[in-house]
Image: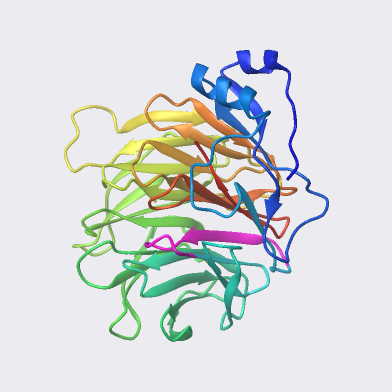
Amino acid sequence: NQSAEFDSEMLGNKRALVATGPVGNGDHIDKKIRMATALVPSSSDVKKQIIESKGQLPRTSTLEAPTMLLTGHSGPVYACKFGPDGKTLVSGGQDKLLFLWAVEGKCENTATLKGCDGPILDLDWYRAGEFVLCASADKTGLVFDMETQEKIKRLRGHTSFVNSICSARRGDPYVITASDDGSCMMWDLRIRGATKTMKDDKMTLPLLTCAFSDDSLQAFTGGIDEKIKVWDLRKENTVSYTLDGHGDCVTGLELSPDGRYLLSNSMDNSLISWDVRAYVSTKRLVRRFGGHRHNMDKTLLKAAWSADGSRISAGSADRFVYVWDALDGRILYKLPGHQGSVNEVDFHPSEPIIVSCANDKRIFVGEIM
């Protein structure tokens, strides 16, 4: 194992750059990367531990190494998500393939699923992990059964790229999709065809992202028009209200675990958390976060909440992985390693682990404090 010594003066800052050990992934080790580094919160206890161990941090997860590098995709990786049980990771991207990875041992690739006729732009797990849902540039959504590892359903109806897909947390087995054709469609997995279509009749602009409310009675959509629309799914093509605050395209939406807040990522280089409870006496814009970057590539960068709702993260075009404190907006981590735009970051459901995927074809799984 490699180690590194750091000047103790570095530890006087609020965060310190420390070595987290060798990067590992079984037979898939990038020889160019000799050591993973991370920015960690600094405290007297952490300083003491770092100094005594000559730069090595105490382990905080069950990963085989503090940072694992997963390789196998032949093109940019646009989406990655931990399964609900935390034992499996799914990823997809430009190569049209759905990769399943074990989140233990050497984080090996356990299966490669085919079925998409276009790049995979977004992924979601269905509830307890029975299915994986894919949004594809082939103008469809796809449903893969995780027990048989076969494609069991294709959602046809959109006339352009399907950029986003999201499943309902409870109730009927509903799924929504957002597309470049300007529509958001709702699907019942028990029947054929879309059950509802939401579309602005006055101005049809591409929709880039979508999410369900906690009770599955509302759908959130964001896109080119910079606004987040909240649709009432109990009515026909009805917008309940809009969330105004971004100054450019909205590329990612994610509902908090408790269902009270919505997180949005935008090309105006900001993240915003919104209060989306039914009755709010104050402004719905809760907090604005900054630090990450979008660039001229116009990649659809996503956003994520930790399982306890205390931290958030987002994709960034500057090749770093950012993690913020959801309450006060501080940047807790700025993690290097990727060599291309980071498209998505996700938190493990039960351990202090994050996963990130990027245009450099790489996926990193690593522990945080």
Is residue 241 among the parts visible in the rendering? yes
Q: Which stretch did the figure color magenta?
A: 75-88
Depicted 75 relative to depicted 355: above or below: below
Q: Residue at x 43, y 64 (%)?
A: 124
Residue 363 position within the rendered picture, expressed as x and y whole percent measured from the top left: 64, 57
Image coloring type: rainbow
Residue at horizontal 48 percent and vertical 33 percent from the top: 324
Residue at image location 78% in from the left, 46% down from the top = 34
**Residue 94 shown in magenta:** no
- Residue 23 shown left or right of residue 292 in the figure: right
Task: Give the total number of marks visible in the rendering.
Answer: 0
Q: Is residue 156 visible?
A: no
Residue 188 is situated, as x and y percent measured from the top left of the image, at 29, 77
Residue 192 appears left or right of 333: left
- The answer to which quarter of the image holds residue 49 is top right
Residues 318 and 355: in front is 355
Question: In which quadrant of the rendered image does the N terminus lie?
Answer: top right
Give the residue at the far front of this rendering.
52
Please state the horizontal and vertical placement of residue 341, each as a whole percent of the image.
Answer: 68, 48
Using residue 131 as the reference point, say whether residue 97 is left or right of it. right
Q: Is residue 139 above or below residue 275?
A: below
Q: Position of residue 89 (x, y in %)?
A: 51, 64
Instruction: Identify which residue, 304 or 335, lies in the foreground.
Output: 335
* Left or right relative to 52: residue 331: left
Which residue is more in the foreground, 48 or 334? 48
Q: Quick one: 255 or 21, which is closer to the camera?
A: 21
